[in-house]
Image (tube, coloured by chain):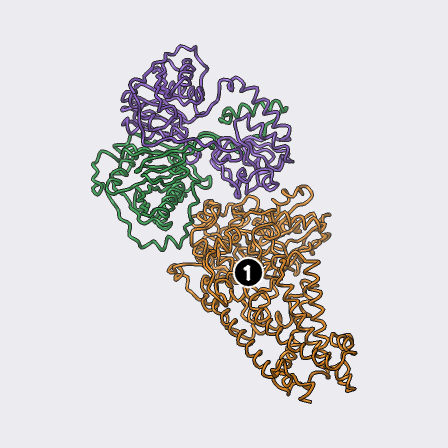
Amino acid sequence: MGNGFDSIAQSSYWLIQGRDLFLFLHLLGTVCFLYIVARRLRPLLAAQRDFRFDRPLARLGRVAQYWLAQWRHPRYRLAGAIHILIFAGFLILAARAFTLLAMGVSDRFAGEASGGWYAAVRAYASTVVFLCMVVAAIRRLAFRPARYPRSADAIFLLGLIALLMAADAVFEAAGGAFYARQGREMGREAPLSLIWACQNLFASLPPASLRGLRLGAYLAHELTFFFLLCYRPFGIQFHVETSLFSIYFAKLERERLKPVRWGMPDDAIDKLDSLGVKKLEDFTWKHILDFYSCADCGRCADQCPANAAGRPLAPRALTAKARDYVFGHYPVFGRPADGQSFIGGVFSEDEIWSCTTCGACEAECPLLVEYIDKIVDLRRGLVDDGKAPQALHKPLKSLESRGNPFGKLEKKRADWARGAARVVNGNRVETLYFADSITSYDDRMQSIGRAAAGILGRLGEDFGILGPAERDSGHDVRRYGEETLFMALRDHNMEAIRASGARRIVTADPHAYNALKHDYSGAPPVEHISQVAARAVRTGWLRLNPVDGGVYTYHDPCYLGRHNGVYDDPRDVLDSIPGLRRVEMKRCRDRSFCCGGGGLALFYEPPERERMGVLRVRMAAEAGANVIVTACPFCMANLEDAIKSAGLEGQMTAIDLAELVERQMVS
Amino acid sequence: MSRIFAYILHKGGVADDSAAELAAAARKIDRAQPCTAVVTGWGADLDKVCESLRGAYPEIWKIAAGPLAYPNAELVRQALLAVIPAGSVVLVPHSHFGVDLSPGLSIKMNAAYVPDVVDVEGAEGSWLKTVRQEFGGQVSAHVHCDISAGAVLNIRPGAFRAEGDAPAEGRVVDKSAQVGAPTARRQYVETIAAEAGDVDITREQALVSIGRGIGEEENIAIAEDLAEALGAVVSCSRPVVDAKWMDKSRQVGSSGCTVRPKVYMACGISGSFQHLAGIKGNPFIVAVNKNPKAPIFRVANVGIVDDILEFMPALAKRVRKESVPAKTKGAAHD
Amino acid sequence: MEILVCVKRAPDTSENEIQLAAAGGDIERDDLVYSVNEPDNYAVEEALQIVARTGGSVTVATVGGEEDEEVLRREMAMGANRGVLISDDGFTGSDGRGTAAILKSFVETGRYDLILTGVQAEDGCAQVGGMLAAMLDYPFASLVTSIEVLQNGKLKIAREIEGGSKEINHIDLPCVLSIQTGINEPRYVGMRGIRQIASVPIPTLGASDLGMDGGAAGRAAAKVRRVDYFTPPEGKGAKILTGSREEIVDQVMELLKAEGGLN
C-alpha cells in the first residue's frame, strides 16, 4: 500500500496534493491554537502569585484520582456515566486522532487504518462517544435538568464532536467497503460499531463514490478537529485542555483558607495598599485557570444552599461571569472591552455576601474548582473598601471592642458555666473547653456548653474554660473578609491558650473547631465533643439510657462534616443509644445542606426567597424524622427558628448531640 | 421666679397635645407662676388655636405674620426673641420642631438649655432640678440648670400628664406688632408626605408588631385596625415578610430594622434571638401569645396569654371607646 | 466645598449594658467601651460623599482629651482629610453651650462652607449644632435626611418631621446641619484602616490657640450640670395578666396610657 486508494497524502484535493493541503492545515491549526492559548495565558500572568508547585507526587495522585479516574463524576449517575464514557473515549481515541493527522502528511501511518485489537476498541469508543453526544444533546434539548443553562453553544459543541466521530467512521467505513469490493478482506469490522454500520450502508456504492467519500470524510475530520481545537478556548470546552492543569494545581490542603497573600507575614498586611480582590487581576492565576476549567456542569449550583434558597448566588454563575469578563478584557482578537465594573457590575455585593462558605460546591465540583477562597478574597476587597454590609458593622465593632459580636461584657463570658466548668484563670489544665461566643452568651446555646462540660465532667477530664480571657474564635470574621480583626482575635486567644498550659482543646462549636484546627497555627490538638463522646461510647466509658420513641435524623454541620470529615462519630454516638431510631436525610454527610450559616451569618441575611433552615427542616420531615440532632450551636439557632417558620412546631424538635448525650447519660 | 412661657405647636387650627402638657410642666416648675402660651402663625387657624387654649392658659400671646404660616424655626426664633422678656423660662415640646428651634433660641436669649426633660423636681436657688433620660432611656439623670438668666426647656411629649381643662377664661393678647415680618436664610419649600408603605418603623414611638401568629395575610387588617386606634404603626417579624404579607421595611430584627419605640406590642411573635436584636431602647413590651412558654414573655414587661386574633380587636374597641372625646378635640401633630 | 464635621466620643451602648455604679450617682464606666458617637459616622460619610461630588476637603474636629484622638483616627480612616483635637484643661466640665463656644472659636480660625454634626450623642441632647449655628449666626437645620448642593451658594435639604414626612428647605451657605442617621450608609472601618492612619499627626489646639478667653467654656461657665444618674424603679420579666379578656384589656389600656403608648 502507500499509494493509490490508501494514501491521503498522495491524493489530490481540487488539484492540490493532500500532503500539501494537510501540512498547511495542520500548521495553520496548530499555530492558531498556540496563539489562542498564549493569549489566554496573559491574564494568568497578570494575576497574583499562588504557590502550587510543591509536592508533585501528591498532585499527580490527585490527577490520577480526579482526572484519570473521574472520581467525582458518578455522584451524578447519568451525567457522570456519560462523561466517563466520553472521557474514556477521548483518551482511547487520542492516539487515533494523531495517527489520522499524520496520515494526511505521510503514508507511513496509512496502513494501520484498521485491524487489530486497538482498532476494535477505538471503533467502539468512537461509537460510544457518538451515542453519548446524541444522548447528551437529547437531554439538553428535551429533558434539560435545571442545573444546565440553556446554551446553543453546548449543542453546537456536542454536534461538532459527533461530527468528528462520524467523519472518522465514514472515513474508515468507506475504506473498508472499498476493499470489500475489491475482495480484499481487511479484517472484520467490529459488529454494531459506527464503522460497521457505515460500512454496511456503503456496501453497494461504486468505488469512485467510496473514494470521494473517504477523502471528503478525512477533510471533514481534519477541519472539525482543528476547528474544535481552536474553538474550545472560547468557551466551556476549554476544560478539555485545562482540567488536567486545574486538577494538578488544585489546593492540596483544602481545609486551609487562602491567606491574604501566600507566604506574607501578618504584619506586612497593614502595609499593603489594597487587600483582597477588587479587580480581576487580584485573583491568583490558579483562580483564573479555574474560570477556564469550569465546564458549566452546574453541579455546584445544584448543591448550593444559597442558590436553593433563592439568594442571588450560584457558584456556576460566579465562574461563568468571571470567565466572560476575562474573555472580554483579555480578548484573543481586538481591543479589550471596558465599561462594566468588576465588583458591583460582574458580581453584585449581595451575591458575594450570599455564601455561607458551607463548601457544598467544592465537595461536588469534578474539577476541584475553588470557590470559598474566591468568595473570601472578594469579601476582603469589599471590607477593605469599607463596603461591609451595614448590618455587620455593629457586630464587627463589638468583636473588636468586646471580643464577641453581641457587644456583651467580657466579664460575663463565663456566666453560662454556672459551676459546670471552672475558669482556668492562671491555673494550668490538661484540657481546655473552648466555648466561643454564641455558646457563651446566647441563652439557648448556653445549654449546649453546659451539656458539653457535663460530658467532660462525667468522663473525669481535668478541664477548664478561658472565661473572660476567651475571645471569639474569629472563624467567621475571617470568612467575612475581616482578616486583620481575625488576626487580633486569634492572637489574643492563642496567648490565653498557651498560658493555660492545655495540651488539648475540646469544643462543641464546629466553627471554633475549624478555626482552632486550621486557622490558628500552633494550637494544641482540638477535638469536637462528638469525637470525645464517640470514643467514650466505644470504650464503654459512657453508657447512654434508652430513648422512648421518636425518629431521629442527624444534620451534618458543614464545619464538622464537609470541612473536617467528621461524619461517623456523631452517628456512632446516636446509634449507641438503645432504642433510638435513626433515619438519614437525602442530603447528608458530604452533601449535607447548610442550615443558613454561622457566625456573622446570623446578623446578615441577603435577599432570599426562603430560609435555608426551612428547606432543611422540610428535608428532615420528608425523611420521616421528628427530632433533628445537630452538633453546632449555629445549626441549632437556625433550625429551631426554621421549625417555627415552617410551621412544624410541635411536630419537630431540634437537639444538640451534646445535650442529647448529657440527657441520656447513665448516672 | 422668672416668667414662664410655653410655645404651642399646632396644625390645621388645632393645638398639639403637648400644649396642655406644657401647662402641666409649667405648674410643676412653679405653681405660683402663671404660664403664658405663645402661638405663632397666620390666618383664621391661628385664632382658632388661641381660642382653644383659653382653658389651659391664663394668657395667650398671639403672633400673626404671613411668613410664620409655616413653623420655620429660624423665623419663630426671631418672633419669640422679639416678645419674650430676658430671663424668662421658655417651654418647648421636644419634637422635630423643638430640636430645630430651642438650642439656637437659648443662645440668642443667653439662657440655659435642657433638652428632653421628663420631669422637674423643684428648684434650689436659681438652679432648677430637671430629670432626663440618657443612653436610650436606660438610666435617668438629674440635670440642674441655672435659670437666673432664663432657660429654654424642651419637654418630652407625654412626660407630663395634662390636667383637665379649666373654664375658658384665658386672655388672648395680640403681640404681632412687636414682631413685624421676620426673614430667614432657610426657606421652607414643601412637605413631602410619607407614602403609604413608606412608614419608617425605626422612628415610631409605638409599634403593633405581628409575627407568625397572625396566621394569614387577611388578618393583617386586624393588626392595622388596632394600630390605628392606638396611633401606632404595624411592624412585623421575619416570617411575615417571608410570606410577602408585609414589606421588608416593616420588619423588626437583625435582618430587618432596628426600632426604638416607647411601646412595643408583640402580637403572635415568639421572640427569636434575631427578632429581639432589632428592638432597642428598652421599650415597654406588651406580649400577646397563645403559647405561655414563648420566649417573648421573658423579655416583655407584660404578657397576655391569648389568641391575638381575638385579643387585638377587643383592645382596639376598648381604645376607641376611651379616646373618642380626645379624638374630637383633635390629637394633631405639628 | 470645605466641610467641618464635629464629632464626639461616646460609650458604645449597642447592648443594654448601662448600669448604675455600685457607689451610685454615676453609671458603671469600667465596662464601657468608647468609640465614635454612631450618628457622627453618618455626618462624616455625608461630608465625604459631598466632597466626592463637588471637591473640597473634610476636616473632623472634637473637643476632648488625648483619649479622643482615636475617634478622629477612625473618621480619618473613613476618608476625612484631617483631624483636629481641641483640648484644654480649662474646657473640662463644659456644658453644651461651652462646647459650642469652643467650636465657634475653632470655626473662626478657618474657613468652612458647611458644618455638620451627628443628630445627637448617646445622652440625647442634640444641642451643640443648633447652638454653634446661633453663635456663628449661621442658618441651621436639624434632622437632615438628604443634602443636595445647588449652584447659587445654597443647599436643598430634607428634614425629617413627624409621621415619616419630609420637609424640604433651601438653606444658605455657610450653615450648620445636624445629620439624621440613615441619611446614607457609612463605610466600614476595620482595624487595618485605623492602623494605617496611626502615624498621621493630629494637631491639638488649646484655648490660647483659639484665642478664647476663660469665661466662655468650662465648669464655671456651665449653666447646666448633670448631678447624678439614677434608675427609675422597674420590674423584671413579663407580668402575666390574668382575668377575663375584658379585664385584661382594661389593664392593658391603663398600662398603655401610663407608658405613653396612646398617641
Residue A98 visible in the shown view: yes
Q: Which chain is rendered purple in the image?
A: B
Please state, as top left, top right, bottom left or bottom right, where the N terminus of chain A lies in the image: bottom right
Q: Classify B324 as above or below C199.
A: above
The colour of chain A is orange
Question: Which secondary structure lies at badge 1?
Answer: helix
Q: Is residue B223 left or right of residue B63?
A: right
The residue lying at 71 percent from left, 65 percent from top is: A135
C33 up-or-down from A277: above or below: above
Residue with the most extreme front position: A15
The residue depicted at 27 percent of the width and 43 percent of the height is C86
Q: What residue is drawn where x is 55% and y is 48%?
A: A420
Give whichever of C145, A268 is nearer the camera: C145
Residue A44 percent across, percent down from the top left: 48, 68
Q: How many marks?
A: 1
From the viewer's perspective, tell me whether residue A473 is left or right of residue C49. right
User: Residue B22 sits in which quadrant?
Assistant: top left
Relative to residue C135, is residue C241 drawn left or right? right
Q: Position of residue A6 (x, y in %)?
A: 69, 85
Q: Nearer the viewer, residue B111 or A542?
A: B111
Which chain comes out green in the rendered image?
C
Q: Quadrant of residue A539?
A: bottom right
Is residue A459 visible from the viewing direction of this image? no
What chain is tagged by disc 1? A
The amino acid type found where label 1 is placed reads: Thr
Relative to the observer, which residue lies in front, A443 or B265? B265
The residue labelled by disc 1 is A319
Report x, y in % for residue B227: 55, 29
- Asked which quadrant contains residue A576, the reply is bottom right
Where residue B112 appears, as percent x and y from the top left, is 30, 28
Q: Residues within 10 Å of mark 1 (few under 14, many from 20)?
A: many
